[in-house]
Amino acid sequence: MSTTEERPMPAADEPESPTNRPGSMHLVKEWLQRPYVRRILWITLAITAVIIALSFVMVAFMNQSGGPASSIMDEIEKTMFVLTIACAPLMAATLAVLTYSWWGGWGSVAAADEPTSDGPGIKTNGVAVVTWITVCSLLAGFLVVWGLVELATITSSSYGSVPANQQPNSVKPVDVNVTAQQWLWSFEYPDSGNIQSSVLVLPVNVPAYFNVTSLDVVHSFWVVEEGVKIDANPGAITNTGFTPTKLGTFNVRCAELCGLHHAYMETQVKVVTQEQFNSWIREQGGNKTS
Amino acid sequence: MSTAVAIHEEAHVPQPTQVGKPGGFLRRTNFLTALISGVVTAGVFWIVTDKITTAVAGAGATNSMALPSGLNINITMMYIGWVIGFMAGIGAFAGPIRWFLGHDLTHADAEYMAGKDMGREKFWKFTTDHKVVGIQYLVVTLILFGFGGLLAMLIRTELGATWTEVFNPNFYNSIIGTHGIVMVIAMIIVISGPIGNFIVPIMCGARDMAFPRLNALSIWLLIAAVPPLVSNLLMGGIRDGWTVYQPLADQAPIGMIGYQICIITFAFSTGIASVNLITTIVRMRAAGMTWSRTPILVYGILGSSIMGLVWFPMYQYSQILALSDRTLLTSFFVPASGGSVWLYENLFWLLGHPEVYVIVIPATAGMLEYLPVFVRKPLFSYRLAVAGIFGVVGLSAVVWVHHMYMTGWAPQSNYPFMLSTEMISIPFSFLVLVVLGTMWRGKPWKRLPMMAVYAVVWNKVIGGITGVFLSDTPVDQYMHGSMFVVAHFHYMLMGAGLFGAMGVTAYFFPKMIGRYLDEFWGSVGFWTAFAGFQVTFMSMFVAGLQGMPRRVLQFDSLFNVSNWISTIGAYIIGIGMLIFLYAIIESWRNGILAPDNPWGGKTLENFTTTPVPHENFPVLPVVTSGPYDFGTPDPYELADDAIMQQTEGAEKVSAQS
């Protein structure tokens, strides 16, 4: 702290010598030429590549049971990629400094010994602090903006600010009343004569709109491969929706602990063609098809 | 304490006269009398309440069961009786009662209570000395971790045995909830309790905490709070997870009352401890210890105490209201009678999220505290670290709704709370820069505490990136309530919190116990647990990505492999933790004796003898320099400075330093 007093102040009447002045990028260039900086940057680059590769692995795991089966799930997976790639360089830089120090790039003192000398007395570094705060804030800002836009996108394609059944769609959506109780799901199709089912059957490429409620405790209606989840609350109706884009059988699971047999509170969602859906409705005794 | 009395004598303030031996009633109280008194009082409360509820139930009633909530009322009163009886039996009320009766505690009584010249029995008594309280906290924490860890092993055993139900679902759900809440309580106190009570007053240069009797009250309230919680396993269990969402909790057996009484009591304990720590830190720092010379651990404990003090009451209210629903048949959270489940969720998460920072901030600050000692460099950008801590404290107040993105409570609120949640990563990034900057070009001394820093930063990076996923509402729509969340918060709470606490404990162990923690067995235990931790929770991330919901005991065969790996990893953690526990116990008894300054640090606790004497310092210290004045002049910077001086004069240089 006291080093400043020891330095000679330049005499006030001494003219500055402009010929001596290094370029403004001088410090950065000098810094980038330090051997340990170069090594850390290389490690950063390598770790960044690994993290980006890992994002593919993560999404592969998400798709293991047959997804993505809706545009919402597509958006979610895209967001996973973007978030990982955006954060990767900063994560990698952190891990690179960590690795370099741990490997003893700057030397180390063995556990059995005791340190004999102090390291460089770097108290702070204005450039580093300002750069770091700026980069982190910009990154966080980007994540927020991306997230808000994505949220608006999936909201408009699920429950939206206008209920799906009032939106100007070319196809009429399928309404389903979802009722959760300990420990089973039941689905009611109000447009088709209130037929009941324990398995969710939906026509492909037709928007489905859900009114979710519970008879007893809080459950959570999770259609895994469609990327949709909403709590089923007693005494309230919550809404969600999606448009299935893939034929097949997917999973509905309860994602909120709801008592003894929470683990077994799961069922299937069968995404079928419109014709199959119509005949299924007739089989169930529905009086009207959509 | 002694100086205060000296001043009083000079001013001729009348002092209470000593009657009988110092300590009086407190000479006869200890942990055993507290247990007996607690059990007896609980029994008396049960019998009296039973008589009253039977009478209230009306003519013809033979027992309290005739009343709709009769049993609940009896159990509640029994637990309240336990807490009151236990506290009376330990002697917690002796001081106020003697003041009320007109013969207040004398100086000799106070010294007796502080455990002066007392042997090991002081650890079993209502002792006010902050060092004794610190050790008591340490032991209680170890017991809680042991119990919670055992439950974790049971949970993993069930999940690893994918072909059968090892436990019945009720017991399984109960151990999930009990594991959660026991570990949360243990994590909340693991730094603020042992280190906060033992080290912080010494680090501040004080003779004791601001309110020594409140200090003893906080630890014994905690000890009184734990048995009701643990007893739930014998009384039907809590089977609701640690969040005990309503109205599921309302259906739970009477074990739930144990949980509620525990939380209500524990919240008092935390509030009292927080007030004590805040007052000590703000008012009792040594002469010359300005806010710019206060060690960063002290800031961390201050921030954590502020959050605990402000937010714990929310959790306490939620449990008081839930208990009232159960016993008085009110309907705060019963939807059938107009209550709201969302009200409960809000009250719960108003503490539930800041609690994460209550856990992580002291662990991080403790790490920042000793990092400069091990690289022999100043803490990089001390002020940025302080800004980071208080940035997190401030923002912690406005992020709780991210636990409720998928509840349907208020879909529009997902937008602002996603914003605030992402914003909290900025003050956290300050702390990351401080760690990296301090490591930068330093020669690490590869002792266990230093190694813990590497482990914790690694865990924090992984916990951080997965936290970014979860804070993003669209991704959370997939992840919420899945194993991914479980793995994420274990990376933060256990990976950053517990492993950080292990490092911090290893660092302060020589000062607290007088002996070094065994380097070999400590490291073996630490790294075994760390390796097992990566296996367990990396694999759990995979289970979550595949779509496995949390808190289940049977699941789709798709998740089998990841759960088998997780279970193997969990057993490795268990072995590692046992080795670490062995290192603690062995070092406590036979470790290498520590000198006064075990690590060559520059904070005040290194300037008193080891073991720390009664009242800490023979003469109160005066602080004349910062806590991290390590380091030699930097050759690179000298070269830079020379250039700068030639060109721009000394202005820039003085601004840098």
Image: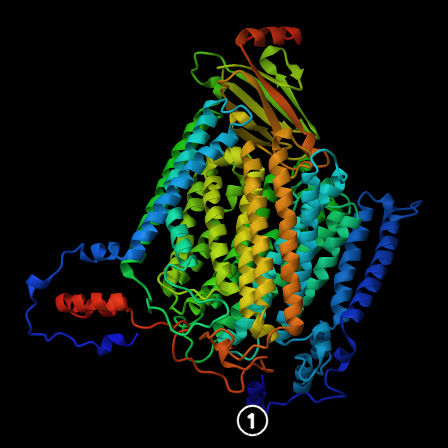
The quadrant the N terminus of chain A occupies is bottom left
Task: Give the residue type at disc 1.
Answer: Glu
Which percent across, then down, holds residue B629?
38, 73
- Residue B472 is drawn in which quadrant? top left
Q: Secondary structure at mark 1?
A: helix
Q: How many marks?
A: 1
Q: Give the chain of mark 1.
A: B
Determine the residue positioned at 58% across, 82% down.
Answer: B615
Q: Kindly identify which residue carries mark 1.
A: B10
**Residue A208 horizontal side relative to residue B344, left or right:** left
- x, y percent for residue B102: 71, 82
Q: Quadrant of residue A152?
A: top left
What residue is at 53 percent from the left and 9 percent from the top? A274
Task: Give percent across and percent down for residue B244.
Answer: 66, 44
Which quadrant: the C terminus of chain A? top right
Q: Is residue B316 visible?
A: no
In this view, the residue in front, B244 or B268, is: B244
Q: Which color scheme does this rendered protein use? A: rainbow
Vertically, is B390 above or below B96? Answer: above
Q: Position of residue B566 (x, y in %)?
A: 61, 42
Q: Taking the image as drawn, is residue B51 in sight?
A: yes
B4 with respect to B386 (left or right): right
Q: Using a 10 Å C-alpha cutoff, classify the residue at mark 1 as few (fewer than 14 neighbours), some (14 to 19) or many (20 or more).
A: few
Vertical placement of residue B521 versus A116, above or below: above
Apparent side of residue A57 relative to residue B24 in the rendered image (left or right) = left
- Relative vertical location of residue B267 with respect to residue B122 in this rendering, above or below: above
